[in-house]
Image (cartoon, rainbow, N blue to C red):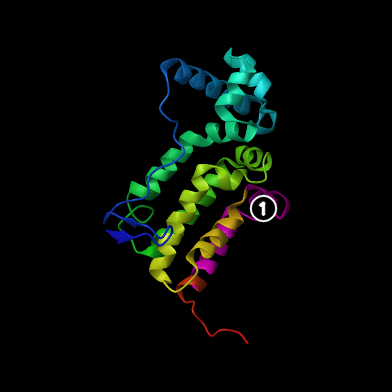
Amino acid sequence: MTHDEATGRRRPAGAELPLVGGPPAERADAAQNRRRILAAAAAMVAERGPDALSMDEVAKAAGVGVGTVYRRFGDRAGLAYAVIDEREVQFQAAFLQGPPPLGPGAGAPERIRAFLHALVDRTEDQLGLLLVAEMDSADARFTEGSYELYRQHLALLVGRIRPEADVRWLADALLAPLAANLYGYQRRTGGMSVARVKAGYDDLLAGLAHGGGAAGP
């Protein structure tokens, strides 16, 4: 067994964090409704943009009652995250099980850098949907399953570099710049390029790797 710095629990040696966010086991009819709803939502986003996503209109397009959509996805944020989900599962598989440096097999600094750069690209690609998902609910970014997995992953890796540090706080700090509203503001209003965002992360990580300086007064 090895210690998981992110959760404080013991886990089997060599075990990776589990993928989250995939659809739960469900009846065939429920699975069919889910596919129809997601297909309708994805088509609406593709044709009219993420801001057009509407629970009522998705229900009509999918041929189901709007109550079915609300019961299955909770709210518009939940529906947006479900549309995002396929790309999310691929991303999780890459950093948990894929080749290095994003996946296992590289050193902790290289894996953290690869993860954050990949997450910048992922945020860039789906920014509109992420804005819808994160802004519909104040806690959506944190209660949606992927955030906690990202946090655990980073905390585990940061702990290998700085075992004396508050790894959970540092993991949150590393994820904070990729909140959709801040990232969108930097890209659209601030005119920052993707390369500049990644370079900023590289500066942060250089400080993390060489941290542990003298405490202030």
Span shown in magenta: 180-206
Please identify the dominant SS of the magenta region.
helix
Residue 170 appears in the figure: yes
**Residue at the top extreme, as displayed:** 63
**Secondary structure beneath disc 1?**
helix
**Residue at the front extreme, as displayed:** 9
User: Is residue 209 depicted above or below 75 in this figure?
Assistant: below
Name the residue carrying label 1.
Answer: 182
Residue 100 percent across, percent down from the top left: 33, 54
Say which residue appears at 62% left-offset and 24% top-offset.
Answer: 44
Residue 118 appears in the figure: no
Callout 1 amino acid: Leu
Residue 16 percent across, percent down from the top left: 33, 51
In reply to whether residue 190 is colored magenta, the answer given is yes
Residue 37 percent across, percent down from the top left: 55, 21
Q: Quadrant of residue 156?
A: bottom left
